[in-house]
């Protein structure tokens, strides 16, 4: 079907030249308002605008997906200092070690420490302490690479006293249970009081205190006191909330739309 598009006010159907055999056929007349466009042109422009909008959204989501996956890769490769035995308080002359993960990772990372007097330097002898001293081995430990990348830190306390408290070295996830254990250097049967930020929170005859389904409100400085023998140093309990991962979850949800759009619109250029 042939279409004869007439401008507004043009009602003349008389052609300027004589018709020929090629002009034979069916014709359809569209009356256009002033400034109007052919319906097919309007549909084509609408589809083009819609496609352009989708392309822009896909491009944005492509960048978002790259950033999210790059962040996840960085998080999965991040090294954390590992303390063995798994506690942050030790008696004087105890043995402990701090490492930066598996052997293949240790080639790139080294253990650093900052002592209580402020001295900073690499931990000697692969950070294996055979006889700990309060002045030289208490402090902050972390992992570091040559280019300057650093891990999170752990605080280690070496005491000359008779009481220590065992608590998680690294942050714990919100909703998990945590057990605090009070240890005496010589005694095994004693009554223990536990404190958080200087306030009494519980008493135990076993030396243990359980915190069920911890939340951010459970973060703080904890210590234990063995009646008649003294108290332990304080240790900070850190709690990592689920909201710390909500941004990744939301971003991955948005990024997944990228693949749906790609399939729907068949965007070969991605």
Image (cartoon, rainbow, N blue to C red):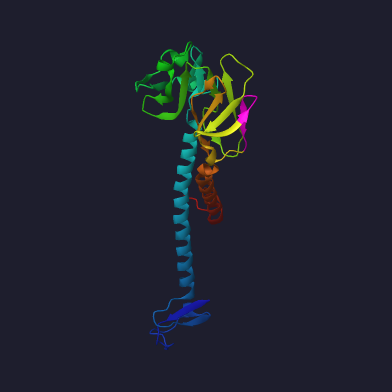
Please give the name of the residue rendered at 52% of the width and 48% of the height, measured from the top-left corner. Answer: 250
Q: Is residue 129 left or right of residue 260?
A: left
**Boundaries of the magenta span:** 203-212
Magenta stretch encompasses residue 209: yes
Residue closest to the eye, 208 or 155: 208
What is the residue that sits farthest to the front in this orientation? 228
Q: Please state which of residues 94 and 203 is positioned toward the viewer in this rendering.
A: 203
Residue 128 on the magenta segment: no
Look at the picture and state if 157 lies above or below 49.
above
Camera-nearest residue between 240 and 165: 165
Picture residue at 51% right of the left edge, 42% below the top: 244
Residue 108 in view (yes/no): no
Image point (56%, 52%), residue name:
260
Identify whether 172 is placed above or below 12.
above
The percent coordinates of residue 9 (x first, y second) are 39, 87
Q: Is residue 229 above or below residue 221?
A: above
Residue 117 appears anywhere in the view:
yes
Q: Can you tell which quarter of the image residue 115 is in?
A: top left
Q: Nearer the viewer, residue 97 or 223?
A: 223
Q: How many marks?
A: 0
Q: Position of residue 195 (x, y in %)?
A: 54, 31
Q: Position of residue 188 (x, y in %)?
A: 63, 17
The main secondary structure of the magenta stretch is strand
- Residue 132 in the image: x percent, y percent? 46, 13
């Amino acid at each position: 079907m042939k279409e004869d598009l007439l401008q507004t006010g043009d009602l003349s159907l008389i052609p300027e030249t004589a018709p020929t055999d090629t002009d034979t056929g069916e014709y359809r007349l569209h009356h256009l308002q002033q400034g109007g466009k052919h319906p097919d042109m309007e549909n084509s422009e609408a589809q083009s605008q819609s496609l352009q909008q989708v392309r822009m959204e896909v491009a944005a989501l492509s960048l978002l997906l790259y950033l999210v996956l790059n962040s996840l890769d960085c998080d999965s490769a991040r090294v954390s200092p590992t303390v063995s035995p798994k506690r942050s308080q030790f008696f004087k002359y105890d043995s402990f070690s701090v490492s930066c993960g598996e052997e293949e990772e240790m080639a790139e990372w080294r253990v650093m420490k900052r002592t209580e007097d402020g001295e900073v330097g690499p931990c000697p002898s692969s950070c294996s302490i055979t006889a700990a001293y309060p002045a030289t081995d208490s402090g902050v430990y972390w992992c570091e690479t040559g280019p300057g990348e650093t891990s999170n830190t752990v605080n280690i306390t070496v005491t000359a006293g008779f009481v220590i408290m065992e608590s998680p070295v690294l942050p714990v996830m919100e909703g998990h249970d945590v057990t605090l254990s009070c240890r005496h250097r010589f005694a095994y049967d004693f009554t223990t009081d536990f404190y958080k930020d200087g306030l009494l929170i519980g008493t135990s005859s076993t030396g243990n205190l359980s915190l069920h389904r911890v939340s951010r409100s459970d973060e703080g400085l904890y210590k234990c006191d063995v009646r008649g023998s003294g108290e332990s140093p304080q240790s900070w309990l850190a709690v990592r909330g689920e909201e710390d991962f909500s941004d990744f979850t939301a971003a991955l949800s948005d990024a997944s739309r990228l693949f749906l759009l790609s399939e729907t619109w068949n965007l070969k250029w991605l």
